[in-house]
Image (cartoon, rainbow, N blue to C red):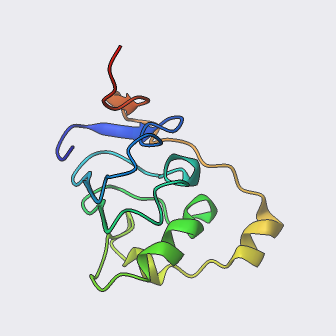
């Protein structure tokens, strides 16, 4: 799913993919990755590669920072160039802010809401 101008993920498109081990979504236009999209897969996925996306290092992404810190690779960078895993927000900071995430405002590309499946 690399280089597809994907802006974001809606719903739970990977929910029924219990055998998914590697998911590469490099070089798209995602600024955030919702926790709900990966809730069931977190114990299964060995590699989630989202490098090259203009990620927002903000409260809505703290869940991902913890998950990525378990891996051995450097991981993705924030839109400002800093390493995502080194973002300086804490869950406590975010609870005080109650910040709501939005998708990249200039993105006119695709949103993923369903992957695979058969009728």
Quarter of the picture holding the C terminus: top left
Identify which residue, 59 or 43, lies in the foreground: 43
Number of numbered labels in the structure image: 0
Q: Compared to 63, does 7 lie above or below?
A: above
Q: Compared to 92, does 60 lie above or below?
A: above
Quarter of the picture holding the N terminus: top left
Identify which residue, 56 or 6, lies in the foreground: 6
Residue 7 left/right relative to 52: right
Identify which residue, 66 or 109, lies in the foreground: 66
Of all residues shown, which one is farthest toward the left?
3
Query: Residue at image x 33%, y 72%?
Result: 81
Q: Position of residue 104 (x, y in %)?
A: 44, 42
Q: Position of residue 102 (x, y in %)?
A: 57, 43
Query: Residue at image x 33%, y 52%?
Result: 19
Q: Compared to 55, does 85 lie above or below?
A: below
- The answer to which image quadrant residue 71 occupies is bottom left
Q: Position of residue 12 (x, y in %)?
A: 51, 39
Query: Residue at image x 35%, y 56%?
Result: 54
- The answer to which image quadrant residue 112 occupies is top left
Residue 33 left/right relative to 27: right
Q: Position of residue 56 (x, y in %)?
A: 47, 59
Query: Residue at image x 40%, y 63%?
Result: 44
Of all residues shown, which one is farthest toward the top?
119
């Amino acid at each position: 799913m690399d280089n597809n101008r994907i802006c974001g993920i809606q719903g739970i498109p990977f929910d029924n993919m219990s055998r998914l081990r590697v998911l590469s979504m490099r070089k798209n236009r995602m600024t955030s990755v919702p926790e709900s999209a990966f809730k069931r897969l977190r114990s299964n996925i060995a590699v989630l590669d989202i490098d090259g996306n203009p990620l927002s290092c903000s409260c809505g992404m703290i869940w991902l920072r913890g998950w990525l810190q378990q891996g051995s690779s450097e991981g993705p960078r924030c839109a400002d160039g800093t390493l995502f895993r080194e973002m300086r927000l804490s869950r406590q900071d975010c609870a005080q802010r109650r910040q709501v995430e939005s998708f990249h405002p200039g993105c006119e590309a695709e949103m993923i809401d369903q992957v695979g499946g058969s009728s």
